Amino acid sequence: MTDYAEGIRRASAIGSIAYAGFAAVDVLLYLLVYDRASIDRIIAYRIAGVGILFGWYFYARSTHASLRQMVVTTGLVLAATAVLIALIASELGGIGSPYVPSTSFYFVAIGVLVPSPWRRTLAMLVPVFVGFFATVTIAAWATQPAAWDTREGVTHYLVSAFIQVSLLAFAAIASHLLWASRAQLYRARRLGRYRLQAPLGTGGMNEVWLARDDTLGREVAIKVLRGAPQGDDDRWMRFEREAQVASSLTSPHTVKIFDYGASDDGIAYIAMEFLRGLDLADLVAGYGPLDVRRAVHMIRQATSSLAEAHEKGLVHRDIKPANLFALSTGDTPDFVKVLDFGLVRELTRPLGHDTHEGVTLGTPAYMAPEQFLGADVTPASDVYGLGSTLYYLLTGGPPFDDKGGDAGLWRAHSSHPIVPVSQRRGEAVPPALEAIIATCMAKHPSDRYRDATALRKALDDLPMIGPWTSGEAVAWWTSARLTPITERKRAATSSKVVTVSARSPASRE
């Protein structure tokens, strides 16, 4: 994802400059050949295209969008600018315009600058071809019907279209080969004593790879931060702080950090334990809401990790299902690990010392009302995240929908009551558990459990809920391996139950 985003940024910058530069060609063609064209419309089309490309450039620089969102946005931007070039071509010669072959510039630029699997490349470039030639064709029929009566013009148009289709196929193949070769080279590279073997996932600003620690002879998960220089860069500072904070925690329910550093070419990395299992977001998305005992069992373990963090004056700030991981192997399957301390707040540091204080940090579907305002947080903010996550485990969905966007989620978390778990679940759950969730998700921090230790005590004292036994956990995972995850809610879940998630899932900022 990082290489792809960097390629998009390069393409958007070069495209903006090139698109603006071709205005000189517009003027030259107008003055020397097509003096009956509307120069006002040509200038308007060119300015609109430059504006779209500059907007794309700033979007590509600042976004934390998913890969799918980046591909869709890129396809739409390229198609829109291609349509504008087609409108310029309709002014400067129609189907016989020198601009008819211009889509070749798109194909070459994307193929070279944004190496991608061929399907992804086609998803970006097919809209360019269709948008351009559809616009030129329609414009010619509407404004220059006589152009279709000349054999020379039609031949030029059809040959150009055929060449562009060939170039489109060539760009997809070339882009795929470049992408495959770069991935192979990357897998073969080393980061310190770690030899990268296979990609495991992407999220936010990071990539995660399976790697081999040749010194100790073990498999590790390597979280990689690419394209961020050391020093004052906020991403590097946050990445380094995650490694330092997580490595200081000793709870067995916190992901273990073995090492962190940076390669000679500026790639920062964190080496952590290699986990086999599922994060709780994938677990529920693939298999549905959990047994009440199992959900409580998992949240109780998460409180053990966070209790240590809270005692040390640390607030996680991004507690959500994707950051809690259930192991599928070992003597105790369903052993939960807390991941991703990249947004941690150290309460001993003055407000404003942490990066981006005063800015919304976290994942809106699960975060406390005060986090939306960029206000200072307390351990009670993590308690809210645990309550939201427990709600998700029991109902299969977050407490509030996101139809109103982040603003709608803020209003809901700040003022709307939650729908009772029993009502969403369709079956009764113990009233005491409903009360615990309601306390965790109280609108004001002072009305919640003070910290994870207080929540753990409430869960320990919960009446009428038996234990989730190790035998039941083993039986569930055995059954799950025989019935892999289905793609019911998440488009990118694993096809097997044994996956790795030392990744840092995308957080909103």
Image (cartoon, rainbow, N blue to C red):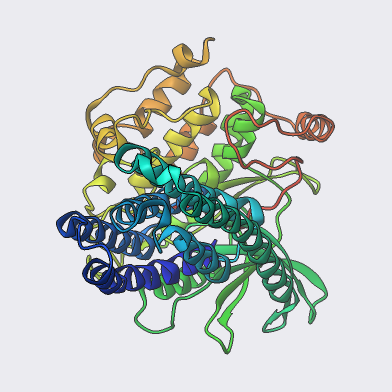
Q: Position of residue 58 (x, y in %)?
A: 31, 63
Residue 399 lies in what quarter of the image? top left
Indicate whether 261 appears above or below 29. below
Looking at this view, is 350 or 506 the one in front?
Answer: 506
Indicate whether 339 appears above or below 292. below
Residue occupying the point 75% across, 44% down: 328
The answer to whether residue 235 shows anywhere in this view is yes
Q: How many marks?
A: 0
Q: Quadrant of the N terminus?
A: bottom right
Residue 495 lies in what quarter of the image? top right
Looking at this view, is 316 or 401 the one in front?
Answer: 401
Q: Position of residue 67 (x, y in %)?
A: 52, 52
Q: Is residue 286 left or right of residue 414?
A: right
Residue occupying the point 53% across, 62% down: 107
Indicate whether 380 appears above or below 489. below
Looking at this view, is 21 or 488 the one in front?
Answer: 21
Q: Position of residue 7 (x, y in %)?
A: 49, 68
Q: Position of residue 505 (x, y in %)?
A: 52, 52
Looking at this view, is 143 or 469 the one in front?
Answer: 143
Residue 315 lies in what quarter of the image? bottom left
Q: Residue furthest front?
A: 150
Q: Residue furthest bottom?
A: 264
Q: Quadrant of the C terminus?
A: bottom left
The answer to whether residue 429 shows anywhere in this view is no
Indicate whether 477 appears above or below 354. above
